[in-house]
Every structure is written in structure tokens, then in C-alpha cells.
Image (tube, rainbow, N blue to C red):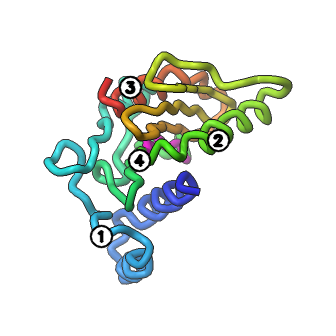
Amino acid sequence: MRHLVAAVMLADTALTAGCGSSAESADSAQVAAYVAPNASAPPSGSSGSTPACYTAEDVKSALGFEARSLTGGMRQFGPLSMCGYAATDGDKLPGVTVTATISPAADADTTFDQMRTVVKMSKGGNAQPDPIQLGERGLAYSTASQARAAAVANGKLYSVEMGFAAVSNFGDKKDGVVELLRKLMGS
């Protein structure tokens, strides 16, 4: 459920970024009842308890395309922290996004089960995500429309997900999301 909340929050941020309309403030007021008081936590690299996110340069280095931040750094929503990026070239890479989340380790079983389901549905048979040497129980995969890596460390679940459903022949981005997960975890 937290993954869904993070996706909705990221989508809302992406859709309202730069709008400047009065609808934007209405959306913020509507969302305020569901968001922790520190939801507008300082961007990455600042002091405080909000974890840091990787940078747009990290996205370019790991995944091979220019990206822009959708969240202005890591944002905290209760026990969930998240940040997001989108490809800057929307014509060549429509809808390409990269999302990082940090949530309580209690979310790990659900996340890993979702990852297994996606891989089985995408690749068939007994296909499974690949184990990675990162944190505890680290897993990663790449399909025709997304790539994801997740691991548990220090009582937290760290996850990086890239979606690219509208781009054909994008290639295997598993190693790239694993690299971003490593940065997110501070490894």
C-alpha cells in the first residue's frame, strides 16, 4: 500500500510541478490531511533526519539519460521517504521515471512478493528476481517496461524503481537501478 501511496504522491508532484494555478494550492490543502507535517522536508544534502536521495547526475551515470528532479530532493511522508526523477527529453523518452523509496523494513515481504509477481507475469514460468549483494534479501529485475531493485538494511526497506512502458527497446536497466539503490543506501 505504501508503494501505491508513493506512486500517487510522485504523480501528483509531477503533474502539478510548475503549474502555478490555484488548483495546485487546493490540491495541497486536500493532501495535507493525509501527509505528515514534515512532508515538505528539506531537499537532499540538507541537515535533519530526512535521508538523502541520489542526484540527476547519478541517474544519468547509472541509466544513461538526462533527468530532472520531480520532488526537489527526498521528501518524507510519515515513515515513508521518497524522491523521483523524470527523463528531460519527453519526446524520445515519454513517461520515463525513476522513483526511490525508503520505508519500514516491515514492508519488505509485501514488496518482495510484488517483485516476484511482476517477474513471473512478465517472464513466465518460475522466473524470479535476481538476488543482489546489497543489504539483506536484496533483489532486482528488469522487464520490458520496468526495472526495480530493493533491499533491507538498518531496519529500513530501500527501493529504486524505473518505469519505461512507453519506450520500446529501452534495454536492461537492472544494473542501473542497482547502482542507484547502492547510492540510496549509502553503500
Segment colored magenta: 95-101
Q: Hey, what amino acid is under mark 1? A: Pro
Q: Which residue is mark 3?
A: 182
Residue 84's disc is 4
Residue 165's disc is 2
Is residue 96 a member of the stretch shown in magenta? yes
On the rendered structure, is 144 left or right of 134? right
Going from N to C along the chain, the mark reached first, 3 or 4, is 4
Residue 38 visible to an observer of this rendering? yes
Q: Position of residue 42 (x, y in %)?
A: 21, 55
Q: Position of residue 142 (x, y in %)?
A: 62, 27
- Compared with 155, 132 (above or below) is above
> Which residue is located at x 39 percent, y 50 percent?
82
**Label 4 vs label 1, nearer the camera:** 1
Q: Hey, what amino acid is under mark 2? A: Ala
Badge 4 crowding class, 10 Å Cα cut-off, few under 14, some 14 to 19, many 20 or more, is many
**Label 2 vs label 3, nearer the camera:** 3
